[in-house]
Amino acid sequence: MIQNVSQTQSEKQAVLSLRQLHLSLTQAGQEYELIKGIDLDLHGGEVVGLVGESGCGKSLTGNALLGLLPSAQAHVRSQNFLLNGKDDLRSADEGRWRKLRGRHLAMIFQEPQSALDPVFTIGQQMLRVIQRHSSVDRQRARDVAVASLADCGLVDSQRILQSYPHQLSGGMRQRVLIAMALSCKPEVLIADEPTSALDITSRDQVLALLRHAAVHHGIAILLITHDLAAVARICDRVLVMYAGRVLESGPAVALLNDPLHPYTNALLQATPHVCSSQPPMVKPIAGRVQALHLAVSGCAFTARCPRATDLCIRQSPDLRAGDGNKRHVACHYPLADFAT
Amino acid sequence: MSSTEPLLELRQLSVQHAVRSGGSTRLEAVRELSLSVFPGEIIAVVGESGCGKSSLARAMVGLVPASSGEIRIQGVPVQNLAGKARKNWHRQTQMLFQDPHSALSPRRTIADTLAEPLEIQEKVTAEQQKQQILAALSEVNLSSDILLRYPHQLSGGQKQRIALARALLCKPSLIIADEPLSALDVSEQARLLNLFSKLRSDKHIAFVLIAHDLAAVQQVADRVAVMYLGQLLELAPAARFFQGAAHPYSQALLKATQRNWQPGYWADPKEADEPVLKGEPPSALTPPSGCVFHTRCAQRLELCSEVVPGQHSLVQAASAAGAHQVLCHLYSTDKLPLHPSQQEKP
């Protein structure tokens, strides 16, 4: 019975499917491997969280998904990189990427101020994007922009279209960018730390909006963040990254309630919760993040891990599947046994 | 928490900024706000962007002038402080900023940065200076090999801890921390929160922690003050606040902080596509009439748009530090009718 459920889930066509993503950077004749083999499937209507501390490679992964890395220095390899199950993106050149970006794959960034051009109004910028990706006249493009802004909770659309970016608050700018991204009806939206620069109520509004876009428009969303509370709020599945690898992945419920990897557990213990009584003090993670470009023979988290042994130094653990192929963990000593 | 004389007391403090927008030229960032900070307590000031919390912090250290009202340092109004007493105010009230990178000079080594306050504040020998710097570094859990580096060689968390070490070298009794956590990773946030808590208990330093993340606030705060459009809507001991915040705005902030997630409990996100508070706070240039929050309040009454609410005390507190005050008509003793839009349809 359980077998059947997982069967249908894996059979469901992924909008974006990536196998063994590797990324290396050449600097001063030396090649550094930064992303060391990542598998990722994004399904329509689903929000997937990509979690980790600064410098773990999560933004690099997001940029690689949109072909945004400079091809002269960055070498992206993968076994499989399919959009809608048929378009192979591995060989896409810049011209092809330009057609895909915005129309099929969209992205929003941490700092909404720098993603908008300060010398053009919101209307000019939105209309340009809409008209670039569909052959509609100005009036029709304007209607699309108004509808998209309204869908993102920005009802005062006439005023917003005439405003310059600096006339809007940070939260409104981020919602304008989401409206702009959604106006072309992309299949995939990559949101790179979209709430880090926002205060608590704007963060709540943006997260609600992303969830709404996934559920009501069937968009596949990758939420790149270090905020586990944001993951808990809107994600269906989570991938935990460290030093260019995925250490743990699985359904958000299972991963947050019963983490398998010591690193996931450490992140959870460092994240404060609101409680009605005094909560336990948060615990910082010992040491610093392993630099991405350094090659390590064993598990990259060894130096900070309370469970590490000699085996962890010698041998890098593979990502093992368990719990009906729903959960994965790369650890010699996971926090719980999980059935394979 | 102590019930002695406050370290710092604000009496009906207003801060205005000159702006040019439409007809109005004065923006009232802080409006007739009264608040006392007692020795060795951590008081958190929370609110959305633009609520005036940074202006409040800057006024507390004298970076912006008060337009009316009074700031008292250990009972003495700051305008009466002169010479040594004034210098002493600036020494014992230190500030931490949101962006630690711009708070450190890029051209100075960490050793130079840390030596500067000692050179200004007191005459000490080179050996004493070195000992004090090393002590401050160990206080913030950094090793001495960081001294010869420059700010760009450090992580954000290390820079914030250097800024804290620099403040500690002035032997402060009060540290005003303006959003010190927002630029940091979750693990560095945890480290800084632990440091604040330790400095409060070991050195009896008081903190005004300006923040918007209530989960982080609950870790360390003794009292919570909620600000909206320059006013204090609620002030309560932290334990009371997190058990049951009184003001509808405080309740919304709490709900927005961590929906769906308690330790060991996680709810389905499918229902989470409605925000807690819609829209933006109104402009501080044209604040709403009556209660400033009535335009976004889910529990507003008929009179909220017309009558300015008074301060209501919810607990008989023996000391000022134990008081729970709320600026809201819901806590008025008279029975009041609901706003027509909230009344149940017959």
Image (cartoon, helix red, strand yellow):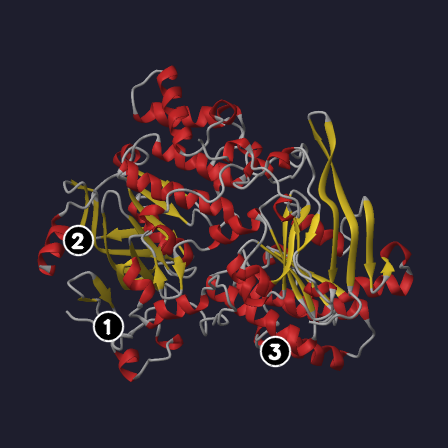
Q: Nearer the viewer, residue A278 or B133?
A: A278
Indicate left or right for A98 with B168 as reference.
Answer: left
Element type at marker 2? Answer: loop
Name the residue that disc number 2 marks. A79
Percent across and percent down for residue B86 are 86, 61
Three-letter residue code for mark 3: Ser
Quadrant in which residue B16 is drawn:
top right
Give the mark toward the camera: 1 or 2: 1
Name the residue that disc number 1 marks. A317
Q: Nearer the viewer, residue A154 or B114?
A: A154
Q: How many marks?
A: 3
Quadrant in which residue B1 is drawn:
bottom right
Tell me the subunit letter for badge 1. Answer: A
Tell me the subunit letter for badge 2. Answer: A
Name the residue that disc number 3 marks. B138
Element type at marker 1? Answer: loop
Percent across and percent down for residue B183 are 53, 56
Q: Are marks 1 and 3 on the same chain?
A: no
Tell me the subunit letter for badge 3. Answer: B
Q: Is residue A174 above or below residue A234?
A: above
Element type at marker 3? Answer: helix
Give the residue at x 43% y 36%: A177
Q: Is residue B217 above or below residue A42?
A: below
User: CA–CA distance between discs 1 and 2?
Assistant: 21 Å
Q: Quadrant of the C terminus of chain B?
A: top left
Three-letter residue code for mark 2: Gln
Three-letter residue code for mark 1: Pro
**Of marks 1 and 2, which one's residue comes earlier in the chain?**
2
Percent across and percent down for residue A131 are 35, 23
